[in-house]
């Protein structure tokens, strides 16, 4: 669940309202909740996971003399204390965590957006998917990634909807091969490269030959093999050197190779390869930077390696579906 996600925040508030101790208020909330589900397909998807949890909380209420407080109290034991003036925000946080306890249905609603569901080619969390396209090009998608294909007589365009992709481009002098994201476009002048979407930026890593980059914010350049650039609202960043062989190995061995990157960025990438959720506050983790090789196909082990490298980190498994990461300070 991303901070600032309006649907996730609304769902958290609904769980708080629907599990209140006042029977009349719960009845009123259920009527409004039914209308909310019908208002947007994304609401209905989120509600699918919530409703299973609400049934479980109903059973807890029955065994607790009509109160949902024992379930909330148990969850509160693993959440940080909130100041009185932030009581409503704390209630929303509890609801959000309760929603995550619902497991796969809730995770599907929050990790896989409608654009992912409607994409031409997709890979689920913790999966890698390879496909040979009609022109002979080969693409490999990392976890929770998706692309749209728009091929015609004059151009081969691939839109990276989310996640990351490794591209091996087949030669076709009559039709350029272009990868597009919200931050810009990358036209292949050679064969092999990776593109990753990270929050509000796109990262291009060149393994062979060259790519012509044009930023949506303005500016263009050519990126050569052994270079990596970040494209964001400010344009195209300065190229940084990379080792193409190590990147190739990382894709083949399902590894994450990072050098001096923010911990929050690393956790975001682990989230895409995990059948569950790592919950954290990026602001709290600011200042922690990571240089490491982490196993993407074993995110539990990756988290253990991070905890061993940074003793100030605290990691708590609430359920198999939710890990909370913060600091001891």
Image: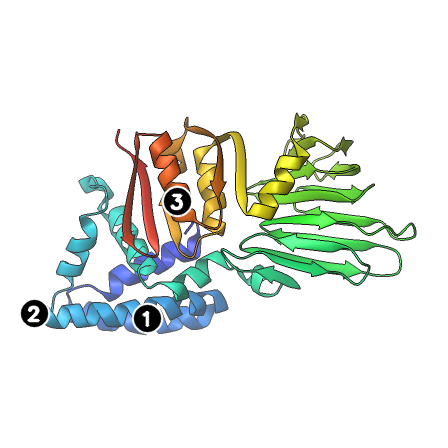
Left or right of residue 162, residue 175 in this image: right
Relative image position of residue 189 (x, y in whole percent): 83, 41
Mark 3 or 2: the one toward you: 3
Mark nearer the N terminus (1 vs 2): 1
User: Does 287 appear above or below 130?
Assistant: above
Dot 1: what SS?
helix
Residue at left 19%, top 63%? 20
Dot 3: what SS?
helix
- In the picture of the structure, the residue carrying the numbered disc 3 is 301
Residue at left 35%, top 56%? 321
Q: CA distance from mark 1 to mark 2?
A: 21 Å
- In the picture of the structure, the residue carrying the numbered disc 2 is 65
Mark nearer the N terminus (1 vs 3): 1
User: Does 329 appear above or below 281?
Assistant: above
Corner quadrant of residue 230: top right
User: Does 328 appear above or below 147?
Assistant: above
Residue at left 44%, top 73%? 38
Colour pattern of the rendering: rainbow
Dot 2: what SS?
loop
- In the picture of the structure, the residue carrying the numbered disc 1 is 51
Relative image position of residue 188 (x, y in whole percent): 80, 43
Residue 232 seen from this side: no
Relative image position of residue 257 (x, y in whole percent): 54, 36
Left or right of residue 206, residue 19 in this image: left
Residue 39 seen from this side: yes
Q: CA distance from mark 1 to mark 3?
A: 32 Å
Left or right of residue 34, residue 133 in this image: right
Residue at left 58%, top 50%? 163
Report crowding for label 2: few under 14, some 14 to 19, many 20 or more residues within 10 A (C-alpha): few
Left or right of residue 86, residue 34 in this image: right
Front residue (pair 12, 194): 194
């Amino acid at each position: 669940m991303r901070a600032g996600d309006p649907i996730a925040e609304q769902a958290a508030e609904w769980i708080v309202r629907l599990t209140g101790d006042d029977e009349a208020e719960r009845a009123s909330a259920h009527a409004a909740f039914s209308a909310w589900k019908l208002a947007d397909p994304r609401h209905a998807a989120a509600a699918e996971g919530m409703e299973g949890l609400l049934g479980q909380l109903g059973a807890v209420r029955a065994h607790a003399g009509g109160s949902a407080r024992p379930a909330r109290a148990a969850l509160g034991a693993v959440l940080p204390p909130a100041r009185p003036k932030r009581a409503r925000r704390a209630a929303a946080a509890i609801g959000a965590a309760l929603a995550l306890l619902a497991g796969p249905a809730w995770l599907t609603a929050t990790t896989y957006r409608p654009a992912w569901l409607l994409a031409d080619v997709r890979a689920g969390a913790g999966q890698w998917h390879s496909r040979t396209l009609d022109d002979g090009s080969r693409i490999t998608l990392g976890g929770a990634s998706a692309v749209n294909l728009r091929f015609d007589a004059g151009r081969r365009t691939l839109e990276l909807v989310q996640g990351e992709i490794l591209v091996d481009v087949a030669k076709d002098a009559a039709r350029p091969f272009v990868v597009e994201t919200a931050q810009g476009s990358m036209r292949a002048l050679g064969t092999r490269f990776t593109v990753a979407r990270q929050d509000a930026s796109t990262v291009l890593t060149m393994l062979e030959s060259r790519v012509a980059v044009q930023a949506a914010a303005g500016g263009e350049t050519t990126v050569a093999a052994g270079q990596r650039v970040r494209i964001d609202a400010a344009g195209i960043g300065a190229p940084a050197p990379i080792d193409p062989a190590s990147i190739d190995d990382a894709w083949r061995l399902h590894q994450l190779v990072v050098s001096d990157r923010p911990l929050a960025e690393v956790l975001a990438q682990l989230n895409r390869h995990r059948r569950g959720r790592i919950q954290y506050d990026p602001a709290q983790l600011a200042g922690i930077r990571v240089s490491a090789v982490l196993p993407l196909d074993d995110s539990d082990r990756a988290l253990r390696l991070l905890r061993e490298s940074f003793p100030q980190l605290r990691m708590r498994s609430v359920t198999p579906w939710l890990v909370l990461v913060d600091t001891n300070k």
